[in-house]
Amino acid sequence: MDEKLQPVRDAVLKRNPGEKEFIQAVDEVLESLGPVVSRRPELLDASVIERICEPERQIIFRVPWVDDAGKVQINRGFRVEFNSALGPYKGGLRFHPSVYLGIIKFLGFEQIFKNSLTGMPIGGGKGGSDFSPAGRSDEEVMRFCQSFMTELYRHIGEYTDVPAGDIGVGGREIGYLFGQYKRITNRYESGVLTGKGLSWGGSLVRTEATGYGTVMFVQDMLASRNDTLDGKTVSVSGSGNVAIYATELAQRFGANVVTASDSSGYVHDPKGIDLELLKQIKDVERGRINDYVERRGGSAKFIPSGKGSVWEVSADVALPCATQNELHGKDAKALLSNGVVAVAEGANMPTTAEATRLFQNADVLFAPGKAANAGGVATSALEMQQNASRDSWGFDYTYDRLREIMRGIHDNCAASAEDYGLPGNYVAGANISGFMKVADAMLAQGVI
Ligand code: GLU
């Protein structure tokens, strides 16, 4: 890291003890900003980087609810409103037992730069809870969401802060959250949440957007080396919304996607994932990934977690779409020894710093999440546009807008990397171009 940035990093570490994912996300950005502060020393004079590392507001609250057995349960709720230089805070809600302040801050910090890269007028934020929807009835999830919103509603609004989904928060949860917001405020404020159902203010393509966008980014990276996805073997981790739609578009572009996973293990299906079956099991039935192998039969295999990693499967392209820090140095080595040519992060920060370095040193095309998975939040911003104009767009038009946005992100990352003497380094390109736009807006808006 540049020596001028080291004191900033030390201060962040001291101020946020124990928040290792947040520190990891800050390190990753600061490591790219050395050339920027050399060129633009006024950014240091105005403490822009210190300011960007400190959330504008952090809200932590109790979420009491009653389970089906009549027992009162207590969870912790969070909303970190990180940066509003470019627009209202925007970012998802994550419901997962691993959630604590450090996870929400890492996600909120990443969201600032991701949202900036989309070119849309949205700031960065994130929220969630340590509540686990797994194994809970619809009624329990509803009661939890209603209690969560009973505190959150006072902090959000279409011009203030616009939450959406993330891990554990999909269409069902957004529905319950929206219903409670409407009930408390007596306002049909469509633009307060994104990821809504299509008949009540949602946008076509939003469901598919994160996974689709990741594959579009891979298409653009491969094109820069006169290559395509057609005929490539692709390994995907995860089996949630991002993984499912990354698989769908990769298959449409002629790739053979051979894996899927969840916390219980992974599936290797050399003939290619049967996406309808995977959607049925994971989306509709909310089942486990080994059900897939039982129902698919043939050469599909299930490897339980602890007995191997999805990254041992030979693939030309790897798409980590599950969760943070799921692809380690040893996994990168396995992928490299099997000849991987491109890796794109569909999830947020799935690749550890060590694994990222290994890919970059081997000249593998590597797309960081803040660029490669920005299609989800970009389409959320398109949903906000439709809500603001009380309009709803067709699928093809919305898809084309997403395609254009993803190409723009790819080209901007490539151009910034080139401009700062790091051609082909999409990590540096994404951090620099995402950062510059926010930094310039912060300078223009004064010390706030
Ligand atoms: N949670 C998603 C992300 O990581 C989407 C956020 C949004 O649509 O606001 O970008």
Image (cartoon, rainbow, N blue to C red):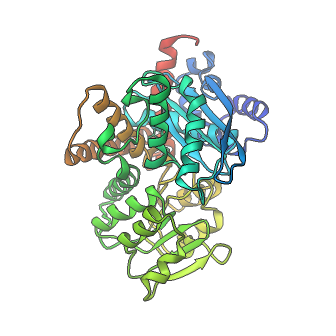
At 59% from the left and 56% from the top, the residue drawn is 136
Nearer the observer, 110 or 282: 282
In the picture, which quadrant includes the C terminus?
A: top right
Determine if residue 241 is in view. yes
- Residue 440 image position (x, y, % from top left): 47, 20
Nearer the observer, 31 or 374: 374
- Residue 399 image position (x, y, % from top left): 26, 47
Determine if residue 429 is in view. no
- Residue 148 image position (x, y, % from top left): 59, 36
Q: Identify the residue at the far bottom of this view.
A: 298
* In this view, 447 is above or below 98: above
Res 223 → quadrant? bottom left
In the picture, which quadrant includes the N terminus?
A: top right
* In this view, 72 is above or below 83: below
- Residue 301 image position (x, y, % from top left): 51, 83
At 39% from the left and 26% from the top, the residue drawn is 189
Q: Identify the residue at the far top of this view.
A: 446
Res 342 → quadrant? bottom left
Number of marks in the image?
0
Q: Is residue 77 left or right of residue 314?
A: right
Q: Identify the residue at the far front of this view.
A: 70
Q: Is residue 405 left or right of residue 86?
A: left
Nearer the observer, 18 or 168: 168
At 59% from the left and 34% from the top, the residue drawn is 34
* In this view, 239 is above or below 420: below
